[in-house]
Image: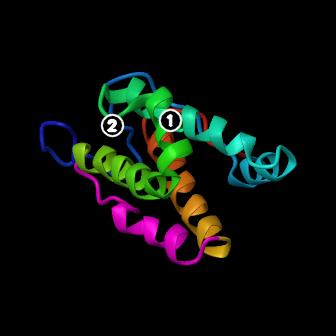
Amino acid sequence: MANAEGAAVPAGRVVPAIGVVGRPTSPARQILMTIITLGVWAIVWTYRQYEDLKNYNGEGMGGGLAVVVSIFLGFLIPFLLASQVARLYLSDRQQPPVSAMTGLWALLLPVVGGLVWYVKVQRAINNFWVSKGAVELS
């Protein structure tokens, strides 16, 4: 791993955050909340993830626009979110664990693939926030 200046960063060391660090969330809890609320929680989750990413580096569409896109063009969200998470890793000179192509899971296999996509993306987000000093989920 390397820091923002390109210098190598020892394994296990936290690279300083450039903005407000988001909060890790439990994939299982989010899936359960989405089922219980008949999908409404997925919109809340989308808002929170995009808002956290925007607050961190000032880039991306933010929560409000993400919700609008998810309502009218929901099939784009898996590609856009995974791409934005990958850019976070790349800006930190880390190998991203997801890419825009990760969205194919949700598009090609809607139920099972959607769950695979969600867990992959949420873990990548959680790991990024933890690398910036957020408290790891127990």
Residue 74 in picture, x, y percent from top left: 52, 52
Asked whether, in this view, residue 38 is left or right of residue 60, the answer is right
Q: Residue at x 37, y 33 (%)?
A: 61
Residue 117 located within the stretch drawn in magenta = no
Q: How many marks?
A: 2
Q: Residue 4 occupies which quadrant of the picture?
A: top left
The numbered dot on residue 131 is none
Q: Is residue 19 left or right of residue 121?
A: left
Label 1, label 2: how many angstroms apart (C-alpha)?
33 Å
CB within 8 Å, label 1 to label 2: no
- At label 1, counting other C-alpha atoms closer than 10 Å, the crowd grade (few under 14, some 14-19, many 20 or more) is few
- The image shows residue 81 at horizontal and vertical percentages of 43, 49
Locate residue 83, reporting x and y percent. Answer: 34, 53
Q: Secondary structure at mark 1?
A: helix
Q: Is residue 137 visible?
A: no
Colour option used: rainbow
Look at mark 1 in the image and give the residue it sits on: 68
Identify which amino acid the numbered label 2 is placed on: Val
Residue type at the position of mark 1: Val
Q: Which stretch is magenta?
A: 93-110
Which residue shows up at 34% across the image and 58% down it?
96
Q: Is residue 94 visible?
A: yes
Q: Badge 2 is on which residue?
A: 15
Label 2 element class? loop
Q: Which of the two labelled residues, at mark 1 and mark 2, occupies the earlier sequence position?
A: 2
Task: Name the image quarter holding residue 109.
Answer: bottom right
Residue occupying image coordinates x 28% and y 48%: 87
Q: Closer to the observer: label 1 or label 2? A: 1
Q: Please name whichever residue, 116 or 43, is drawn nearer the observer in this view of the structure.
A: 43
